[in-house]
Amino acid sequence: MTAYKKYFPITKQCTYLNTPASGVLPLPVLEYRQEHDFDFFMMGSAIKDNRGPALTAVREKVGTLFSCAPNRVALVPNFSYGFNTLLEGVPTLQKVLLLEQDYPSVNWPFESRDFEITYTQIDGDLEQHVETAFAKAPPDIFAFSAVQYINGIKIDFEFLKRLKATYPDTLFFADATQYFGTEVFDFDTSAFDVMGGSCYKWMNAGYGNAIFLFKEAVAKKVFPKTTGFNSLQGKYKAQEGSFLGRFEPGHQDTLNYGSLGVAIDLINQIGMETIEERIQELATKAKTAFTERGLLEDAVVQRTAHSSIFNLKGDKALAKHLNERGITCILRGDGVRVGFQYFNTEADLQVLLDALASF
């Protein structure tokens, strides 16, 4: 609905379809950031007095939104930092299953360490390939993106539950940067053991904040080494011993994590159910239109369910053509990537379709 555009003034200047690259800052977050820095400017070190309660409140908001106890929520500056911290605590020489051409920040951290790695492909039969790989050699760790950053393929969460039930000893690590904030999600009932994601995309929280969610059993299998004075500070870290604190060893940035808290407030105000409905409705219409025009790869067309990220067949010339017509998108992989957020409308989709028709 156009009503949501009021929170995102940039949408008055362009047709913004680039959330998979960067979400935009909503007005409530901008106002919070201005007030926070003015307080810091005027108060100096006194602003630290409320740091503990403020960060605790953010963890509680994250936990409520994603159904994860706040004492299993880590606040980190970005996904890559948190994921590398996690892997530093994983015993080496374990068997790891990865997806070919997955997001580099998922695969590279494993490839730079001593693990026994195998790969399976990403295509329309993704789940079948994963199941076959498990049957052949069950891994100790299965790591993957919940939603693929290039073409938007989303792995079937119900399939993952069945797979986890069959292989309960395998740890499931997921990057949710292209997923968090797109639909209602219950972490505790999911198959994931660890789920992390940067929040500057679909959460619209700005840069410098990310979250990691953990199942309780992870602390018995993973032993991160990172530490610092902040590792045992705070309500939840003190209760959990040092595991959560290993991800938060230093002073935490109340500006960036506070921005995440305000972004979650906006999500709650609109309603995650409403956001999910809007995104899925637009994604369904977009996929139908793109399929009719032959703009999608077969792997995406074959999928029953899909995210709201699409890679359209095209090159630099097409990206330039769209940008010149006020459509914000980007080249990724072998095509032009677009993504539909809840503030987008059917009119935005039509603008894109008209521009594609004129190319």
Image (cartoon, rainbow, N blue to C red):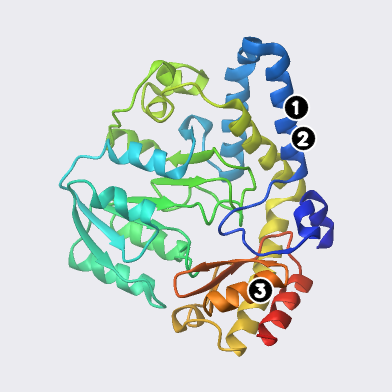
The answer to whether marks 2 and 1 mark residues whose Cβ atoms lie closer than 8 Å is: yes
> Secondary structure beneath disc 3?
helix
Which residue is label 1 attached to?
A: 35
Check disc 2 and report the residue beneath it. 31
Q: Position of residue 91 (x, y in %)?
A: 20, 39
Up-down: is 106 above or below 63? below
Q: Secondary structure at mark 2?
A: helix
Disc 3 marks a residue whose amino acid type is Leu
Q: Which residue is mark 3?
A: 322
Residue depicted at x 73% and y 50%: 271
Q: For mark 3, does the 10 Å Cα neighbourhood hold few (<14), some (14 to 19), or many (20 or more) residues? A: many
The C terminus lies in which quarter of the figure?
bottom right
How far separated are the C-alphas under marks 2 and 1?
Answer: 6 Å
Helix, strand or loop at label 1? It is helix
Q: Position of residue 327 (x, y in %)?
A: 69, 68
Which is more foreground, mark 1 or mark 3?
3
Mark 1 surroundings: few (<14), some (14-19) or many (≥20) residues within 10 A: few
Which disc is residue 309 wearing?
none
As drawn, is 227 to the left or to the right of 47?
Answer: left
Locate the N terminus and report the quarter of the image it occupies.
bottom right
**Residue 152 seen in the figure:** no
Q: Earlier in the sequence, mark 2 or mark 3?
A: 2
